[in-house]
């Protein structure tokens, strides 16, 4: 048994050798995995089959791997089978076994990068399907081959490093992978630089792939970007290879100072103008455009003591733009010589060379122009007393011409004087009043009046200056105070009763020429002080009281009012006071109010004016009444002034039911000519059914026409009055009567019940009815 064991082990090794491509026997090794040692020998467990190795990418298929046997039955009486991945599990069909001989075959090419080993189970059954042996494990290991190239993780690696970096400065790192077995040389990678130009400034670590600088000399202004070609190879550098690139960018440092392109610059500027550009200063800088190492900053070192110039940087061109911030004056200085320096925004590196043209001279020539006049004091403020008479001098608002080398004359005029109050001398600028300014002017704001004066030279292209004149109108105490609107109420006759009479004062003058006011009883009448007293309430009011009991009725007092102006103004003003008998509550008792007819605070002149107005009104009323009476008498004449042979001397009564044309009871025509003589029935007239419910309003008497031309208006007014009179039928209303029979030769004259219009009527037949209807035929018939 020991010999067979050794033979079996040898066969397994030969099988492994075949799997590695080493020449050997083509027959597979026979294994007895279930064989046990004899009883007398040491007890052994079932065989554990060692892993079976087979190379990936094996092309001779099917390839026998191994043969397993059971010694419990004769050959042909045992059925073998295997299970597991590669057989009945994915990937299926990779391995198979001859069920009678126990030979295991490889049926497909293996790929270690997909599956590096297979673990199968082997079974041995008799022909009846009973288990002869316990299942045993069968492991197949796939041996790696160098069938994968290494691969960089990126096609291009990027890195940045400052120009002038010292050797050994880290730049970037290249990375690569290999799908082969990392435990073998198939995945042992080595990095190298295939190409980088000359000189060689970079190196790469063959194991880690780190790229570093190897020597000095990196200058962005010479070469800004470097392109390196990298290579990686497996088998420790002797196997398969792959390439990639590395792009290394040099970052700029301020190692170049800016320089002027010239030593001197010449420019011209116009006087009296500010905020304009004069010229440009060109500079050069080799550093990265747009970076702080490139941006220039200019400084005026000398030649501008008053700060009239400034230099800003054009962000696109990096040029210095010289501009004027304060207007130049040709008469003061014709030429300027500026000393200008330039530096970068970022500080210059210590090792950088200093610029040869870091400074330059700028010569500016000032051009003379016609400048506008200049007011010596603008705005000019002055004051003037209110009410100043015409011709009063206000001020002399003069200007000067800065063009001293040009002989020019100035003229003055007004540009704004809303009240047309001022007069300006065109030659001297002397301003005086030409009329009195009203204190109530809407253009007097807060006691100030504003005007605008122009000064203009006489050049071919004249220039104008504008000056503002502000005049303070000084308040003058020219008004005496007066009593406020007449006080209301009355005084009690007893001094201890009632609140007294409150008196107030007003003044047209403004402070300080107004309040506080001083109230005093007139010194001309000493008896007033013995009977009356005045006590100051505040700056504008005082209270009047009797000193002792005074008689009831109207009392005429005289007050002296004085303001606080300098000099003070005073006025003596009469005051009428009504005194009454009061009760305990200080109110006039009933019956005492009749004495108030005089009116508190009303003077005799005011009473005369009221009485004269009433008398005049009474006269006007009497004149209107007399005129109306005369017109009424003139209208008492006859209503109709036509010919004496009036044909309408009878009116037939048709408003009675029955009778008809046979009823010849006529009305007297005189009743129409004198309607006022009609006798009216007593009592209220009957109302129409359609009349509104309410009180009947009497109709006013109608005025008779005075001429034949007024008859038409009189008739229309009468018809309208009849329509609105609820006691009579409305005008033009159809009256329906009982049936009167037929056979009448006369047609109806009603315009309401007529079936034909007036234009269809033929009124000529009326001539046949007699002279009474001839007039109607003439009026309505054909001519």
Image (cartoon, grey):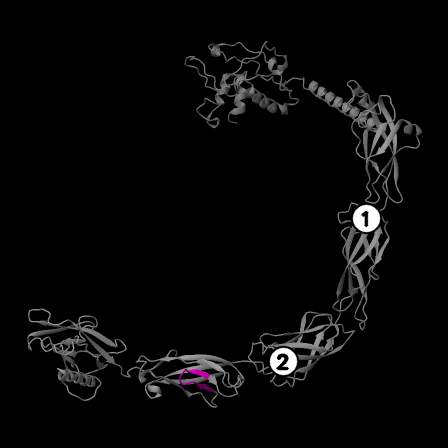
Q: Residue at x 57, y 14 (%)?
A: 649
Rendered location of residue 259, percent (x, y): 63, 83
> In the figure, residue 739 lies in which quadrant?
top left
**Depicted 180 relative to depicted 590: above or below:** below
**Depicted 286 relative to depicted 376: above or below:** below
Instruction: Identify the residue under disc 1.
Output: 437
Q: What span is colored magenta in the figure?
A: 202-211
Q: Which mark is residue 282?
A: 2
Distance of label 1 from label 2 (alpha carbons): 64 Å
Q: Earlier in the sequence, mark 1 or mark 2?
A: 2
Along the line of sight, the residue nearer the viewer: 453 or 1: 1
Q: 10 Å neighbourhood of mark 2: few (<14), some, or many (≥20)?
A: some
Asked whether, in this view, residue 714 is left or right of residue 520, the answer is left
Asked whether, in this view, residue 658 is left or right of residue 143, the answer is right
Rendered location of residue 272, percent (x, y): 73, 70
Along the line of sight, the residue nearer the viewer: 353 or 331: 353
In terms of secondary structure, where does tag 2 sit? loop
The reply to whether residue 501 is in sight is: yes
Rendered location of residue 181, percent (x, y): 30, 80
Along the line of sight, the residue nearer the viewer: 339 or 134: 134
Asked if the magenta segment contains residue 331, the reply would be: no
Q: Which mark is residue 120?
A: none
In terms of secondary structure, where does tag 1 sit? loop
């Amino acid at each position: 048994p020991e010999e067979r064991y050794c033979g079996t082990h040898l066969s397994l090794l030969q099988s492994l050798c075949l799997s590695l491509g080493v020449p050997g026997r083509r027959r597979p090794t026979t294994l007895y995995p279930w064989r046990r040692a004899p009883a007398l020998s040491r007890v052994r467990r079932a065989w554990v089959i060692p892993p079976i190795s087979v190379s990936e990418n094996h092309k001779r298929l099917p390839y026998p791997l191994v043969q397993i046997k059971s010694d419990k039955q004769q050959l042909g009486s045992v059925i073998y089978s295997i299970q597991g991945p590669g057989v009945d599990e994915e990937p299926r069909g990779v391995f198979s076994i001859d069920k009678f001989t126990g030979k295991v075959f490889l049926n497909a090419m293996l790929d270690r990068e997909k599956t590096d080993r297979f673990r199968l189970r082997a079974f041995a059954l008799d022909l009846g399907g009973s288990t002869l042996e316990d299942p045993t494990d069968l492991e197949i290991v796939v041996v790696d081959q160098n069938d994968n190239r290494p691969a960089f993780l990126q096609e291009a690696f990027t890195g940045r490093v400052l120009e002038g970096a010292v050797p050994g400065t880290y730049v970037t790192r290249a990375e690569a992978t290999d799908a082969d077995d990392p435990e073998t040389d198939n995945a042992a990678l080595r990095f190298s630089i295939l190409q980088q130009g000359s000189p060689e400034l970079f190196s790469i670590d063959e194991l880690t792939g780190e790229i570093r600088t190897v020597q000095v000399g990196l200058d962005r202004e010479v070469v800004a970007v470097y392109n390196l070609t990298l290579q990686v190879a497996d088998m420790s550098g002797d196997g398969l290879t792959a390439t990639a690139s590395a792009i290394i960018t040099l970052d700029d440092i301020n190692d170049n100072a800016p320089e002027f392109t010239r030593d001197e610059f010449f420019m011209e500027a116009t006087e009296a103008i500010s905020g304009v550009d004069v010229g440009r200063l060109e500079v050069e800088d080799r550093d990265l455009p747009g970076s702080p190492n490139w941006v220039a900053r200019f400084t005026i070192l000398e030649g501008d003591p008053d700060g009239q110039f400034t230099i800003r940087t054009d962000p696109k061109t990096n040029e210095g733009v010289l501009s004027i911030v304060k207007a130049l004056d040709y008469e003061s200085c014709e030429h300027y010589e500026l000393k200008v320096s330039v530096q970068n925004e970022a500080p210059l590196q210590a090792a950088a060379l200093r610029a040869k043209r870091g400074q330059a001279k700028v010569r500016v020539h000032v051009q003379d122009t016609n400048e506008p006049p200049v007011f010596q004091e603008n705005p000019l403020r002055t004051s003037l007393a209110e009410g100043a008479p015409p011709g009063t001098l206000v001020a002399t608002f003069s200007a000067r011409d800065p063009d001293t080398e040009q002989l020019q004359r100035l003229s003055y005029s007004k540009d704004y004087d809303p009240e047309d109050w001022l007069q300006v001398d065109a030659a001297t600028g002397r301003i005086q009043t030409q009329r009195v300014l009203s204190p109530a002017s809407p253009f007097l704001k807060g006691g100030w009046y504003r005007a605008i004066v122009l000064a203009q030279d006489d050049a071919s292209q004249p220039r104008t200056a504008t000056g503002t004149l502000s005049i303070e109108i000084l308040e003058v105490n020219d008004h005496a105070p007066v009593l406020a609107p007449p006080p209301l109420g009355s005084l009690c006759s007893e001094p201890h009763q009632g609140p007294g009479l409150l008196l107030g004062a007003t003044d047209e003058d403004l402070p300080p020429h107004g309040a506080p006011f001083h109230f005093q009883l007139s010194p001309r009448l000493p008896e007033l002080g013995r009977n009356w007293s005045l006590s100051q309430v505040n700056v504008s009011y005082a209270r009047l009281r009797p000193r002792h009991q005074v008689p009831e009725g109207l009392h005429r007092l005289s007050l002296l009012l004085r303001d606080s102006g300098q000099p003070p103004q005073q006025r003596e003003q009469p005051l009428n006071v009504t005194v009454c008998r009061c009760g305990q509550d200080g109110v006039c008792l009933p019956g005492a109010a009749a004495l108030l007819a005089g009116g508190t605070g009303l003077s005799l002149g005011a009473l005369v004016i009221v009485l004269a107005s009433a008398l005049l009104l009474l006269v006007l009323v009497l004149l209107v009444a007399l005129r109306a009476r005369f017109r009424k008498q003139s209208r008492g004449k006859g209503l109709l002034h036509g010919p004496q042979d009036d044909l309408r001397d009878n009116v037939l009564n048709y408003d009675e039911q029955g009778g008809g044309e046979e009823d010849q009871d006529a009305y007297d025509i005189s009743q129409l000519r004198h309607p006022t003589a009609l006798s009216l029935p007593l009592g209220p007239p009957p109302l129409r059914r359609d009349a509104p419910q309410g009180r009947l309003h009497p109709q006013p008497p109608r005025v008779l026409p005075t001429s034949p031309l007024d008859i038409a208006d009189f008739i229309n007014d009468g018809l309208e009055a009849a329509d609105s009179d609820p006691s009579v039928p409305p005008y033009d209303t159809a009256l329906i009567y009982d049936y009167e029979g037929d056979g009448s030769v006369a047609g109806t004259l009603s315009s309401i019940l007529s079936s034909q219009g007036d234009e269809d009527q033929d009124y000529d037949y009326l001539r046949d009815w007699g002279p009474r209807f001839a007039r109607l035929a003439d009026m309505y018939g054909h001519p």
